[in-house]
């Protein structure tokens, strides 16, 4: 198993863009069908807190979220692992780091949106005790309360 190095906010816009391109097809539907990846990478770089796992010079896992400290809440806008590392436990390791980081930041509520057709992702979030807050035609808004 490769060695991972954890960083907070190390990535550049280019690193994020490259990561999103590699992960594009892992999203259901592909992320590029719903958002312009270059603009999204720039937005994540400028506004999101990013927790990252790297191997050598490659960003292999990314958790990006927006903090609303006054509300003690966070919104996970991106959670992705490149396909080469799917099934290695890296996603769970990244989720554990994310939950620990948010808990230490005095965040009590986490939300995220996931497409219903992305069964792998919805199963992962339910396994991590996220609960359905609302359901739209194509998406679920999930919530997790931290103690």
Image (spheres, rainbow, N blue to C red):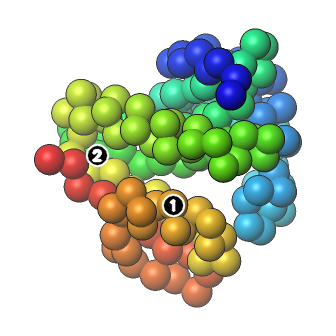
**Residue 16 rendering spot, x and y as whole percentages:** 73, 30
Q: Which residue is disc 2 drawn over? A: 73
**Rendered image quadrant of residue 29:** bottom right
Mark 2 Cα within 10 Å, few/some/many (few <14, many 20+)? many
Asked whether 43 or 32 is in front, the reply is 32
**Residue at image coords 57%, 42%:** 89
Q: Of the numbered discs in the image, which one, if any, rests on residue 124?
A: 1
Q: Is residue 74 above or below residue 58?
A: below
**Residue 96 rendering spot, x and y as whole percentages:** 40, 38
**Rendered image quadrant of residue 138:** bottom right
Mark 1 Cα within 10 Å, few/some/many (few <14, many 20+)? some
**Residue at image coords 52%, 27%:** 51
Q: Is residue 11 above or below residue 47?
A: above
Asked whether 47 or 103 is in front, the reply is 103
**Rendered image quadrant of residue 114:** bottom right
**Quick check: can you spot residue 46?**
no
Tell me the distance, in whole angstroms, between the alpha carbons under discs 2 and 1: 21 Å
Q: Of the numbered discs in the image, which one, if any, rests on residue 67?
A: none
Left/right of residue 34 with respect to residue 126 in the rendered view = right
């Amino acid at each position: 198993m490769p060695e991972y190095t954890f960083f907070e906010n190390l990535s550049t816009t280019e690193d994020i863009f490259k990561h999103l391109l590699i992960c594009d097809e892992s999203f259901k539907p592909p992320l590029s069908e719903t958002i312009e990846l270059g603009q999204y990478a720039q937005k994540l770089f400028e506004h999101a807190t990013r927790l990252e796992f790297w191997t050598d010079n490659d960003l292999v896992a990314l958790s990006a979220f927006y903090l609303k400290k006054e509300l003690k809440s966070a919104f996970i806008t991106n959670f992705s692992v490149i396909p080469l590392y799917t099934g290695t436990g890296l996603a769970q390791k990244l989720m554990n780091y994310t939950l620990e980081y948010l808990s230490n930041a005095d965040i009590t509520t986490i939300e995220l949106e996931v497409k219903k057709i992305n069964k792998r992702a919805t199963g992962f979030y339910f396994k991590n005790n996220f609960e359905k807050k609302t359901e739209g035609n194509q998406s679920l808004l999930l919530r997790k309360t931290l103690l």
